[in-house]
Image (cartoon, rainbow, N blue to C red):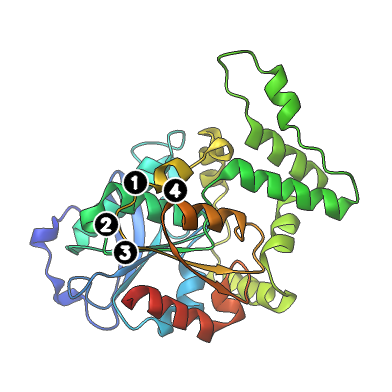
C-alpha cells in the first residue's frame, strides 16, 4: 500500500480486527496498527513516550479496553518502524516538527477527517503540538502524564538523584547562567540532567520516579521482553542533540484551540504535579488524577479506562 493516496485507498481493509501497516510516509518507514475503521469516527492515535519507545506494550496491556477506532503508531526510529538513519531526513535532524508531520501523513493516508491524538509522557508533547498545528484535524487531545517543560523535568530528576545518593541538592543553573557570555543560551537542562545521571543511572532514576510499586514495573518489563522491542537510543540521542533538555513548550499551550484532557498518576513524579500544572493552567485542560504512576493502565486498569472514556465523550 506504500505510495497510495488516501483517496485511492479501499477502506474495506479496516474491519474490527484492524490491519497492520508498514508504510513510507513523510520520508520514513512507519509501523502502525489500526483497530476498527478510522473513517467511521475520529480514531484515537496512541503516541508513545520514551522518546524512542513503542506502542506495543500499551496495545497488549490495555488495547482491548478501547471500544472505538484506534491507531497504535511506532514513531519514526522507534519500535517496529524503520531505523532513524534510514529515513530521508537522516538521524541528525529529528525534531518535534518532523514527528508531528509523521502523524499528519498517517492521518491523511488513513483518510480520517479528524483524529484524537493521545500522547503519553514525551508523546504528549507530540499530541499537543499536533492539536496546535492542525486544529481542524483534531477532535480533542488527551495527554497522559505529559512532559512539556524539560529544564524543569531535569531539575526534578536531579533533586531525586541527590536525595537517593544522600547528597545536598545543588542546581548548576545559577553558575551556568553567570558563566555564559551575553547573547549565548545557557544549557541549563543539559547541565542538570548530566549532573543527575552522574549520581544515578537513568533507568534506576526513572524507575524510582515513575512506578507506584515493583509489581507494575515488572508487568511492563515482561511486556517489553515479550515484544522484543527494547531500544530507541538513536531517537533519544537525536532529540538531545537538537536541544531536547532545553525545550520549553508551555508558551505554545495558550495557542491550543481544541479541548485538552489530562490523565495523570499521582505517583508519577516526572509529570505530577509540575508538568501537569503547566497544561492545566495554560491550555485550560481538564485534569483527572489517579492513584497510579507513569503507566496508569498498569496500576488501575478500570480507573484509567473510566478516565479515558470520560475524556473521549465529555
Helix, strand or loop at label 4? It is: loop
Residue 106: give its label.
Answer: 2
The crowding category of the residue bearing disc 1, from other C-alpha atoms within 10 Å (few below 14, some 14 to 19, many at least 20), is some
Q: For the residue carrying disc 3, how many other residues have a C-alpha within 10 Å: few (<14), some (14-19), or many (20+)? A: many
Instruction: Tell me whether the residue at label 4 lies in contact with that at label 3, contact meaning CB atoms closer than 8 angstroms.
Output: no
Mark number, residue 165: none
281 vs 113, left or right, is right
Q: Mark 2 or mark 1, which has the lower sequence index?
A: 2
Residue 116 percent location from the top left of the image: 31, 65
State the mark number for residue 83.
Answer: 4
Q: CA distance from mark 2 to mark 1?
A: 24 Å
Whether residue 200 is visible to the viewer of this picture, yes or no, is no
Image position of 153 with respect to 58: above or below? above
The residues bearing labels 4 and 3 have C-alpha atoms spaced at a distance of 30 Å
- Residue that lies at the very extreme toward the top in this rendered image: 182
Q: Earlier in the sequence, mark 4 or mark 3?
A: 4
Relative to the observer, which residue lies in front, 83 or 145?
145
Against 54, residue 291 (above or below) is below
Whether residue 261 is visible: yes
Q: Where's residue 9, x and y in %?
A: 12, 64
Position of the C terminus, as image quadrant, is bottom left
Spatial CA span between label 1 and label 4: 33 Å
**What residue is disc 1 on?**
255
Q: Quadrant of residue 71?
A: bottom left
User: Horizontally, is 5 left or right of 264 in the view?
Assistant: left
Marks 1/4 in contact by CB < 8 Å: the verdict is: no
- Mark 3 or mark 2, which is nearer to you? 3
Amino acid at each position: 500500500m506504500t505510495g497510495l493516496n488516501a483517496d485511492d485507498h479501499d477502506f474495506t481493509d479496516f474491519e474490527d480486527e484492524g490491519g497492520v501497516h508498514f508504510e513510507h510516509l513523510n520520508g520514513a518507514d512507519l509501523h502502525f496498527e489500526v483497530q476498527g475503521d478510522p473513517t467511521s469516527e475520529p480514531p484515537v492515535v496512541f503516541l508513545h513516550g520514551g522518546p524512542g519507545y513503542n506502542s506495543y506494550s500499551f496495545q497488549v496491556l490495555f488495547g482491548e479496553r478501547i471500544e472505538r477506532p484506534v491507531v497504535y503508531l511506532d514513531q519514526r526510529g522507534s519500535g517496529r518502524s524503520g531505523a532513524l538513519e534510514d529515513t530521508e531526513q537522516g538521524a541528525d535532524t529529528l525534531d518535534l516538527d518532523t514527528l508531528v508531520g509523521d502523524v499528519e501523513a498517517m492521518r491523511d493516508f488513513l483518510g480520517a477527517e479528524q483524529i484524537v491524538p493521545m500522547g503519553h509522557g514525551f508523546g504528549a508533547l507530540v499530541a499537543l503540538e499536533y492539536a496546535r498545528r492542525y486544529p481542524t484535524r483534531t477532535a480533542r487531545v488527551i495527554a497522559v502524564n505529559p512532559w512539556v517543560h524539560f529544564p524543569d523535568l531535569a531539575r526534578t530528576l536531579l533533586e531525586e538523584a541527590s536525595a537517593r545518593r544522600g547528597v545536598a541538592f545543588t542546581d548548576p543553573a545559577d553558575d551556568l547562567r553567570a558563566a555564559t557570555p551575553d547573547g549565548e543560551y545557557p544549557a541549563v537542562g543539559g547541565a542538570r540532567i548530566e549532573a543527575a545521571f552522574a549520581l544515578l543511572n537513568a533507568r534506576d532514576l526513572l524507575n524510582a520516579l515513575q512506578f507506584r510499586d515493583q509489581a507494575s514495573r515488572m508487568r511492563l518489563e515482561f511486556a517489553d521482553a515479550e515484544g522484543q522491542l527494547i531500544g530507541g537510543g538513536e531517537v533519544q540521542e537525536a532529540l538531545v542533540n537538537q536541544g531536547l533538555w532545553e525545550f520549553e513548550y508551555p508558551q505554545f499551550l495558550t495557542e491550543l484551540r481544541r479541548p485538552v484532557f489530562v490523565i495523570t498518576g499521582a505517583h508519577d513524579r516526572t509529570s505530577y504535579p509540575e508538568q501537569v500544572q503547566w497544561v492545566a493552567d495554560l491550555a485550560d485542560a481538564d485534569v483527572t488524577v489517579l492513584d497510579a504512576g507513569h503507566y496508569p493502565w498498569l496500576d488501575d486498569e478500570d480507573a484509567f479506562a473510566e478516565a479515558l472514556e470520560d475524556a473521549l465523550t465529555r
